[in-house]
Image (spheres, rainbow, N blue to C red):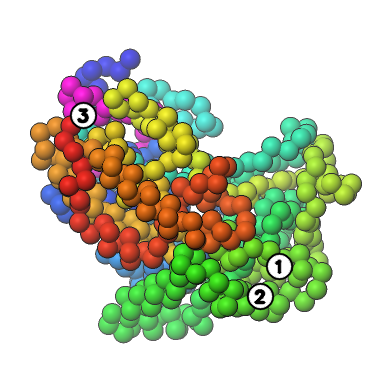
């Protein structure tokens, strides 16, 4: 039991201090809502960019776009030694950027670190949420019970998807005497020099990890289940060219918007006419493959068999060259089992290994909730048993005074998620203001949520994710897409410019 004296009342409780939570806290403060508490389970803020520390990890969206529009950061120069070192920032630069933003936004005084939320339940008598927490602990162990919070409004900014790593279960894996690690749970003390390393997966994480370790390992075996589409990065030629962007007044913002519209063109092929990729984007990707892989047998293994965009695109200039190194092997035979010293494949081959790295991605379409949520005697887990859904990706019927940042069907396959977050900030802040000003609270009307999701399903049926000929983390096991936004990002922004009070009812 939590001591009643340990209950902390507040207007708004935000769970998560990554891009979504920090930006929302700033927006709430700008809207005159200062009684805000931001909880973070980690010992530092940062979310994804604190947790992911595997070799080579970086943003695969250009950082002038993958940053706050209200906190643009210039490229590195003598005048700005803390600026971006290039067009695609590594994780430590993004982490440092978020740390600076927390100071600039005056969010640190609202932030409580090392606090893990266990559950949240709506109290209809007090019209407040009861949020129970514990001290975050290492190694997945439960920590000591911390205080209880009683906010008027609860916001989950802890990541709806791409939060829970997927580790395949292979027969005999427990017998393997070497090291097994997931890229999302990297051990910084792991020394790979001269060792025989297996990487399972060839998605976005592997495309960064493999080039980063290929020159230090003894031998690297990369297991590929499905060849993905790899397209080259946008490039500015050198540091001088990067610096020149910031010498021109408004140059950085102009670059940001140029990149934004270039990447929105990709959405047309994702959402409205997948054949556009067949005509334009796929030939560019295949030219990239042909230019970087001379061996016809290897090139054929790496040739995708589905429409571009059906799985997440890989943005890389060095993944293909890493696979052509003499100490790197690409294996497409399925893994049969593990033994004490390595991996067995279905063709009877044994691949010796000292270390196995799972670059196998995250649960997305069926990711478990970050904490238990209950209202009116109903658990959100049960409400979402057939697939998660929310009104405009933010509010769920039957759960008053609750918002999600980056909730169901707000994901992207072509551009920056920060833009989607910024579309949600004013909408959620306006909704919070309405909830605080009402007598008790508001919840979205079921007919409004149903109409929104009918619109999504109609749009999704013709997108590349649903019809591109692949299985991906965008889709649940039943084939339902609960992850992607089926439109241009500016369309989502337009739909959230105003808080639609008429679609909410008082509780």
Q: CA distance from mark 3 to mark 1?
A: 54 Å
Q: Return the residue found at the far top.
A: 1
Q: Position of residue 290 (x, y in %)?
A: 71, 77
Query: Label 3: few (<14), some or many (≥20) within 10 Å?
Result: many
Q: Position of residue 465 (x, y in %)?
A: 53, 57
Q: CA distance from mark 1 to mark 2?
A: 8 Å
Q: Secondary structure at mark 1?
A: loop
- The tag on residue 303 is 1
- Camera-side residue of 476 and 357: 476
**Identity of the residue drawn at 27% across and 59% down:** 495
Q: Earlier in the sequence, mark 3 or mark 1?
A: 3
Q: Quadrant of residue 493?
A: bottom left
- The tag on residue 128 is 3
Query: Label 1: few (<14), some or many (≥20) within 10 Å?
Result: some
Q: Position of residue 38 (x, y in %)?
A: 29, 41
Q: Position of residue 114 (x, y in %)?
A: 38, 35
Tell me the magenta residue range: 110-131
Q: CA distance from mark 3 to mark 2?
A: 55 Å
Q: Secondary structure at mark 3?
A: strand
Mark 1 near mark 2, Cβ–Cβ under 8 Å? yes
- Camera-side residue of 169 and 392: 392
- Camera-side residue of 327 and 28: 28
Question: Mark 2 = which residue?
Answer: 286
């Amino acid at each position: 039991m939590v001591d009643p004296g340990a209950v902390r009342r507040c207007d708004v409780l935000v769970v998560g201090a990554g891009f979504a939570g920090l930006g929302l806290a700033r927006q709430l403060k700008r809207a005159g809502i200062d009684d805000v508490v931001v909880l973070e389970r980690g010992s530092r803020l940062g979310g994804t960019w604190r947790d992911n520390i595997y070799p080579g990890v970086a943003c695969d969206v250009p950082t002038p776009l993958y940053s706050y529009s209200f906190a643009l950061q210039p490229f590195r120069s003598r005048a700005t030694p803390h600026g971006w070192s290039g067009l695609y920032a590594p994780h430590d630069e993004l982490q440092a950027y978020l740390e600076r933003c927390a100071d600039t936004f005056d969010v640190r005084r609202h932030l409580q670190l090392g606090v893990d939320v266990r559950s949240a339940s709506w109290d209809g008598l007090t019209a407040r949420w009861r949020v129970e927490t514990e001290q975050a602990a290492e190694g997945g162990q439960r920590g000591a019970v911390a205080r209880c919070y009683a906010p008027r409004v609860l916001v989950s900014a802890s990541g709806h998807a791409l939060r829970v790593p997927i580790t395949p279960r292979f027969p005999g894996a427990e017998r393997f005497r070497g090291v097994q690690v997931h890229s999302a749970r990297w051990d910084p003390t792991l020394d790979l020099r001269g060792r025989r390393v297996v990487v399972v997966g060839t998605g976005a994480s592997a495309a960064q990890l493999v080039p980063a370790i290929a020159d230090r390992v003894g031998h690297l075996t990369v297991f590929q289940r499905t060849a993905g589409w790899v397209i080259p990065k946008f490039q500015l030629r050198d540091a001088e060219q990067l610096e020149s962007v910031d010498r021109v007044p408004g140059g950085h913002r102009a670059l940001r918007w140029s990149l934004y519209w270039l990447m929105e063109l990709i959405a047309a092929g994702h959402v409205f006419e997948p054949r556009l990729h067949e005509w334009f984007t796929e030939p560019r990707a295949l030219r990239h493959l042909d230019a970087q892989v001379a061996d016809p047998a290897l090139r054929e293994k790496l040739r995708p068999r589905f429409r571009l965009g059906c799985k997440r695109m890989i943005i890389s200039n060095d993944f293909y060259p890493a696979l052509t190194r003499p100490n790197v092997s690409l294996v497409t035979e399925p893994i049969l089992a593990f033994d004490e010293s390595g991996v067995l494949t279905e063709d009877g081959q044994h691949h010796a290994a000292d270390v196995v790295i799972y670059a196998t991605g995250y649960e997305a379409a069926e990711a478990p909730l970050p904490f238990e949520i209950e209202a009116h005697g109903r658990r959100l887990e049960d409400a979402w048993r057939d697939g998660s859904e929310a009104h405009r990706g933010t509010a769920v019927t039957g759960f008053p005074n609750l918002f999600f940042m980056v909730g169901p069907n707000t994901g992207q396959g072509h551009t920056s998620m920060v833009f989607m977050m910024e579309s949600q900030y004013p909408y959620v802040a306006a909704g919070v203001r309405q909830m605080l000003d009402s007598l008790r609270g508001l919840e979205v009307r079921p007919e409004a949520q149903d109409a929104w999701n009918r619109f999504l399903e109609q749009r999704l049926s013709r997108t590349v994710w649903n019809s591109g000929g692949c299985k991906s983390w965008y889709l649940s096991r039943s084939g339902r897409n609960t992850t992607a936004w089926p439109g241009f990002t500016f369309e989502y922004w337009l739909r959230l410019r105003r808080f639609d009070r008429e679609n909410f009812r008082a509780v």
